[in-house]
Image (cartoon, rainbow, N blue to C red):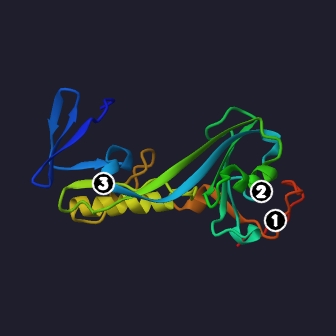
Amino acid sequence: MSRPGDEIMMENGKVVGVRSGEEIVRCKQVYCDPSYVPDRVEKFDRVIRCVCLLKGNRYPRIEDPSKRSKRLIIPGREFNRHSDIYVSLVRYTNVSPYDWVIAMISTNVETDFPEEEIGPALALLGDIQERIVTVSDCHWPREDGTESQLFISQSYDVTTNFETTLLDVLDIFRRGTGEDFDWNRVRFLKEGQPRHFEESDFVETIFLDEFDEEASWTTMEIVKK
């Protein structure tokens, strides 16, 4: 823990341990992300992500006060794109200081000018106090790991709700254990009772049609689907 993984030890095509410096830890399975095994994954996409800090008074209205976050999806067809542009926002009650909002923009890179591709979302957000932009490759494993016992996750994709990541984790669990994950084992710590969460419990999702980059949060027509 909290040490670099220098080498995944293999014997006869199967995992036998992990080396960190001079120390070797023996094991029968390894679960890791693509960055640990670049020779065992292949690229399938590129994603641009932009984290923006906004003042809270620019936060869009929320129909249901119980929803503390909002996710916007700008259809790619509005800009002759193959990929939609995703925008998620969380307000101060979640992770940011009072009166501040954190917005995260992401989309698949389709040109040599990725920052221009998120221009519609940046225009929608308006007055951005600070922003951090990253462009990264997405990878997936070349094998399912059942033979080698080396289970590699996929990179985070463009979506902002982590649904594909959750499905990937559940698939890795099934491949590694031979059984499906039992959600009935998950209990709410405070209530002590099984609880199945729905994304709609916390996040309001809206689709923006007929995008108008001159519009603001208060003037844009929002079409819910």
Residue sitting at x 76%, y 69%: 78
Rate crowding at label 3 as few (under 14), some (14 to 19) or many (20 or more) other CA atoms within 10 Å.
some
In the shown orientation, is residue 205 left or right of residue 10?
right
Q: Are marks 3 and 2 in contact (CB under 8 Å)?
A: no
Residue type for callout 2? Pro
Residue sitting at x 40%, y 56%: 154
> Closer to the camera, 107 or 191?
107
Q: Residue 120: which disc?
A: 2
Among the two numbered marks 3 and 2 on one chain, the one whose residue lies closer to the N terminus: 3
Q: x, y (%) of residue 14?
A: 14, 53
The residue beneath circle 3 is: 40
| Residue 183 visible | no
> Closer to the camera, 101 or 41?
41
Residue type for callout 1? Phe
Among the two numbered marks 1 and 2 on one chain, the one whose residue lies closer to the N terminus: 2
Quarter of the picture holding the N terminus: top left
Q: Among all residues in the image, which is located at the extreme left?
A: 12
Residues at marks 3 and 1, CA–CA distance in whole angstroms: 41 Å
Q: Among all residues in the image, which is located at the extreme top?
A: 22
In the shown orientation, is residue 201 left or right of residue 216?
left
Label 3 or label 1, whichever lies nearer to me, is 3
- The answer to whether 23 is drawn above or below residue 75 in the figure is above
Q: x, y (%) of residue 131?
A: 70, 38
Among the two numbered marks 3 and 1 on one chain, the one whose residue lies closer to the N terminus: 3
